[in-house]
Amino acid sequence: MPRLAQVATARQAQLQDGRRLGFAEFGAPGGRPVILFHDLWGNRSVRHPDDSILKRLDIRLIGVDRPGYGSSTRKPGRGLMDVVDDVMLLGKALKLERFAVLGFSAGGPYALACAWRFPQIVTRASVVACWPPLDHPRGFRAMHPLYGRIFQLAAGNEALFRLILRGFLTFDGQRPAEQYIRELGSSLARSDQAALSNIDLFVSRRNMWEELRSAGSEPLADEIISLTRPWGYHLQSIRAPVDIWWGEDDRFCSPVIGARMAQMISKATPHCESQAGHLLLYSHWEAILRALIAQ
């Protein structure tokens, strides 16, 4: 496992194996630390646009770029636990004795991995609209039909998947990033479309997509492929307390996923929101954070 050599700036750490780890901090500098794992299309900046919420709750939010995202160096062939190792080293460099973890969508499996592997360090975990395990056909069927088929291709034919994804990003790079965000939003629930009507949130998501596609298709392919492999732990083995949030109107990840996870994790607290979709991280931001830092 690589060891963290130093923190080069407030937004980047240098790993001893030569890789860089991008991160950003928001909220109260001396507040209760929460490390956030972003979604598939996100980066270190994922959060509600109103940072006064973080300050009011006395939270120091630390968003981390996974390998290949933002200013983090790509690591071909990486798995979930490689990311967990990097984040734990960052926590040590920032002198965080204990902290909470928050995972949104594709970031959920990483937050759960931290809770499983380091229950003595992770005070509490929260997963929001979490992806299911994708090492079984049931997982693909629990996702949006189009994306479920795409992810299943990633699991079955990596070379073809990388080729198709490269072609898509080449095509998408010829049009404004706003167009893709609008198209993605139109495939989601009305509550999600309402969330994206917030101009600050829309601009934030657009900027994230611009940064991601500028890096090319390989980092995104690495991410998707890693999530179609066995995660390296069983949900039943997680001993840290976990909040599981899902929206009944989620069209990307079936509500069945959250309900099933809540049954399998011994210290899980389920939060099913009837008027929410996949983007409930934003619509229920303050409630999610309050539960996460509750003693």
Image: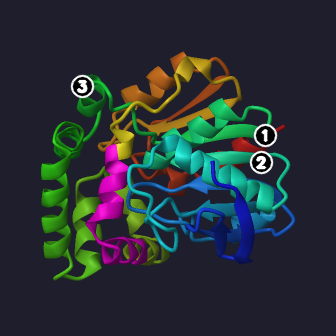
Amino acid carrying mark 3 in the image: Pro
Q: How dense is the environment of label 1, judged by Cα within 10 Å: few (below 14), some, or many (20 and up)?
A: some
Q: Is mark 2 in CB contact (under 8 Å) with mark 3?
A: no
Q: Can you identify the residue that label 1 sits on?
A: 121
In the rendered structure, the answer to whether residue 26 lies left or right of residue 251 reads: right
Question: Which of the marked residues, 1 or 3, is nearer the chain's N terminus?
Answer: 1
Task: Report the Cα–Cα distance between label 1 and label 2.
Answer: 7 Å
Q: Can you identify the residue that label 2 sits on?
A: 99
Amino acid carrying mark 2 in the image: Phe
Where in the figure is residue 241, as x and y percent of width and height?
70, 29
Q: Is mark 1 in CB contact (under 8 Å) with mark 2?
A: yes
For the magenta stretch, what is the residue range? 207-225
Task: Report the Cα–Cα distance between label 2 and label 3.
Answer: 34 Å
Decide whether residue 219 is among the magenta residues: yes
Identify which residue is drawn at 58% across, 68% down. Answer: 18
Q: Is residue 76 above or below residue 127?
A: below
Question: Which of the marked residues, 1 or 2, is nearer the chain's N terminus?
Answer: 2
Judged by its main secondary structure, the magenta piece is: helix
- Nearest-to-viewer mark from 1 and 2: 1
